[in-house]
Image (cartoon, coloured by chain):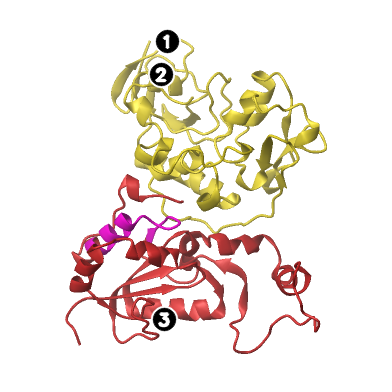
Amino acid sequence: MSAKPRIATVSLAGCFGCHMAILDIDERILRLADLVEFDRSPINDYKTFTGRCAVGLVEGGCCNEENVHVLEDFRRHCDVLISLGDCAINGGVPAMRNHVPLRECLEEAYLKSPGVYNPGGVIPNDPEIPLLLHRVYPCHEVVKIDYYIPGCPPPADAIWSAIVALLEGRPVELAYAGLKYD
Amino acid sequence: MQFVLDGKTITATPGQTILKAAEAAGVYIPRLCAYKDLIPHGSCRVCSVRVNGRIQAACVQTVSSGAIVEHDTEELREFRRDVIDLLFVEGNHYCMFCEKSGLCELQALAYRFGITAPKYPLLNPKRDIDMSHPDVYLDHNRCILCGRCVRVSQDLDHKNVFQFVNRGLEKRLQVNGEALAATDLRVTDEVVASCPVGALMKKRVGYAVPVGDRPFDAQPIGADIESGKGGVA
């Protein structure tokens, strides 16, 4: 196994915009590849952890049971866990459904919306489909989170400086320009 | 007359509030409900300072000679952070698609205080949006009940478009009519510009200023006061 520190990333109930922001560090991605080894991540398509990770970056909140299991798995495998972006920190756009009961959300999506063709009137309930939670939770309401980088998505410079700080053994400190909610 | 602010002697005029006297001396005391040309109200408590040992709202408390005022202490910073945190979780503040983002005073205060995540559980209340008016909309999701609109409409516009109804968590802004369109609100009224958040907004002008050029993109709220160039209230 490589001696490089390992980094894992995941997108839970998010749009992958935060992963786009990771890629937005541009040519520094080559330096990052020299500094770290990517473990479980959509970047290398690893579906499971292969070892202990120094840093876990979590995009998206928890909207279903699978999200909770994955997040707990990240907590178990990562020394430092970072909530990346507004969905992980506040629930973001997926949390807009928190204002209405889950039953109404499902009926609106599968029964009542214009254009829906569902003659059986069945709301999908296959066991293969992860069970929706009654509301969308930010990650820190499910597991302990060590650092937060807000933004939709966070600025690439903020992500880069956070990773570099952690690799150098320093705490994550966001500069004013790196603290953005939008 | 003179008083002491965080160990520094400040000269003030009789009847001047602590907030205004501090501002004149280049010290920014964070505030939300205070607004230029408006009689201060003291409702949001973001400007709380300790005066001779007692917590007071700096926007309404007038200066007394020889007063010892504490403002930039960890205790008061934490108190203000808590107020801002509570305002965020009590409403539905989706900064990522809010037209006011970058010029929202609540967001700017959170930036200034370095808030990266909510301290309290989000309440996600169910609130309405009033789109009835041709030129203005009222999004209750973003309303922080600071009361600026209530007072600006009455005192500066000489109308009575807004009022508070109910108490506690049920407290909300009510308009003087069936909906906003049924009131005598005009888009040119001062009240429309007075909202510190994205609750009362002009239609068809959103996102006019590019990201990076918005008021709070480069400098924190209050930086203008600290540099001696005057403030928003």
Residue type at mark 2 is: Ala
The local secondary structure at tag 3 comes to helix
From this view, report whether residue B128 is shown above or below residue A104. above
| CA separation in Å, label 1 and label 2 | 8 Å
Q: Which residues are magenta?
A: A148-164
| Colour chosen for chain B | yellow
Tell me where residue B216 sits by quadrant.
top left
Chain for colour red: A
Q: Are marks 3 and 2 in contact (CB under 8 Å)?
A: no
Identify the image quadrant of residue B111: top left
Which amino acid, mark 3?
A: Asp
- In the rendered structure, the residue with mark 2 lies on which chain? B
Subunit that carries the residue with mark 3: A
Residue B151 in the figure: left or right of residue B216: right
Coordinates of residue B134 in the picture (x, y in percent): 72, 36
Tell us which disc is closer to us: 1 or 3. 3
**Which residue carries the number 3 mark?**
A73
Q: Position of residue A134 (x, y in %)?
A: 64, 71
The residues tagged by marks 3 and 2 sit, at their Cα atoms, a distance apart of 54 Å
Do the numbered discs 1 and 2 sit on residues whose CB atoms are within 8 Å?
yes
Q: Residues within 10 Å of mark 3 (few under 14, many from 20)?
A: few
Q: Is residue A163 magenta?
A: yes
Count up the numbered dots: 3
Marking on residue B21 = 2
Q: Which residue is mark 1?
A: B13
Residue flagged by tag 1: what amino acid is it? Answer: Thr
Residue A156, image x and y in percent?
A: 33, 58
